[in-house]
Image (cartoon, rainbow, N blue to C red):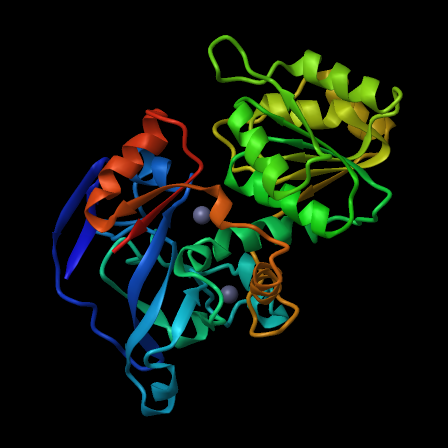
């Protein structure tokens, strides 16, 4: 089969490899759509995967081509989404069904071979059946959409809340959609590209505000300016919830300074480097009794209530609009072009999907 094999940092080979062999409990998935995740860029070009060679790609969907065990034969031919985290099932958090925090997990596309290939081996436990009406490209976005839902579920959220959302990448925009689904009316989103703002308004709510934080260099967020504007818009009080989807010192500082006393700050974005805030901002955590919360991954435990099932339901009821985030649909052979667009910002992009 054709696959993209990471041989070393920045060394991604498009090559022929054997179709993965199955063992008991595993299925072979024919990949029909795979998304490029923001985290794939540092993984492929800076840090590498846990070992080499590895086939990257953790956001993918397809149909089951084969299974190892007789008892799993009903899966063959089924259209499936794939939860990429393989829990150990034995550590103390797994025993609490909190698999997203497993102490000893495996991961498709970083710790073992993933979805940038014609076929991927996936434990049957990690498969989720897809409804007819869900497209493969939507199914390839179940992971980021579930991560966004999981993040919001860390908060105490009521329709009265006012929210500031910093960072409008894929997860940020989907988070805005979930805020709308949860009935939140007042949301201020901050990004550095007005096209992200347009997609956010189109898919979440026209009524959500987009505040531009574009610098002349197009990169960092203008800290004080954005916070001042949010404080003005909330009559000087600040928002009750501030969410950082960018993972930078600036955006986390913005969160601390735009939230009201007793407010909640949610850290979502993967950090790009060390995160530091000045003393005054730190004082805000103490004096304003701010609740700072983290979130990681998503829940998948074969229950209707888990993040993945809830996400599928919201897609099918058209409350969640994932396809609108796709700016590029590329052939399987064009993955490197997609990675270059995401890495070097060669052209406007949001979600880039590869279709083998
Ligand atoms: Zn991802
Ligand atoms: Zn575990």
User: Is residue 75 at least partly visible in the picture?
Assistant: yes
Quadrant containing the C terminus is: bottom left
Q: For this rendering, which residue is in front, 319 or 279? A: 319
Position of the N terminus, as image quadrant, is: bottom left
Q: Is residue 126 left or right of residue 306?
A: left
Question: Along the horizontal axis of the image, is 344 left or right of 85?
Answer: left
Give the residue drawn at x 53%, y 67%.
91
The answer to whether residue 247 shows anywhere in this view is: no
Above/below status of 71 relative to 289: below
Where is residue 245 drawn, in percent x and y?
59, 35
Residue 79 pos. (x, y %): 39, 72
Q: Compared with residue 155, is residue 142 higher up or lower down, i.e. above or below? A: below
In front of the other: 230 or 132: 132
Furthest-bottom residue in view? Answer: 70
Q: Quadrant of residue 327?
A: top left
In the image, is 81 to the left or to the right of 294? Answer: left
């Amino acid at each position: 089969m054709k696959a993209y094999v990471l041989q070393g940092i920045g060394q991604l080979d498009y090559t022929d490899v054997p179709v993965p062999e199955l063992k008991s409990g595993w299925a072979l998935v024919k990949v029909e759509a795979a998304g490029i995740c923001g985290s794939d860029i540092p993984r492929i070009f800076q840090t590498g995967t846990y070992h080499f060679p590895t086939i990257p790609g953790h956001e993918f969907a397809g149909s089951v081509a084969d299974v190892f065990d007789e008892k799993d034969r009903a899966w063959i031919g089924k259209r499936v989404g794939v939860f990429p985290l393989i829990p150990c099932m034995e550590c103390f958090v797994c025993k609490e069904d909190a698999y997203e925090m497993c102490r000893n997990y495996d991961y498709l596309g970083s710790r073992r071979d993933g979805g940038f290939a014609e076929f991927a081996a996936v434990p049957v436990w990690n498969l989720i059946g897809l409804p007819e009406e869900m497209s493969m490209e939507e199914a390839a976005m179940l992971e980021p959409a579930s991560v966004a839902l999981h993040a919001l579920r860390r908060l105490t959220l009521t329709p009265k809340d006012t929210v500031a959302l910093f960072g409008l990448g894929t997860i940020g925009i989907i988070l805005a959609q979930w805020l709308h689904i949860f009935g939140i009316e007042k949301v201020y989103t901050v990004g550095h590209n007005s096209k992200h703002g347009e997609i956010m308004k189109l898919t979440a709510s026209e009524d959500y505000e987009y505040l531009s934080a574009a610098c002349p260099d197009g990169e960092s967020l203008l800290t004080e300016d954005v916070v001042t504007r949010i404080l003005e818009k909330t009559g000087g009080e600040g928002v009750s919830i501030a969410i950082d989807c960018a993972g930078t010192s600036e955006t986390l500082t913005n969160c601390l300074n735009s939230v009201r006393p007793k407010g909640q700050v949610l850290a979502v974005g993967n950090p790009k480097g060390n995160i530091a805030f000045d003393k005054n901002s730190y004082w805000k955590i103490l004096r304003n009794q701010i609740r700072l919360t983290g979130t990681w991954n998503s829940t998948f435990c074969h229950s209707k209530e888990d993040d993945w099932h809830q996400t599928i339901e919201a897609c099918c009821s058209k409350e969640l609009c994932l396809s609108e985030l796709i700016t590029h649909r590329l052939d399987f052979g064009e993955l490197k072009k997609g990675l270059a667009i995401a890495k070097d910002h060669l052209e406007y992009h949001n979600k880039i999907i590869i279709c083998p």
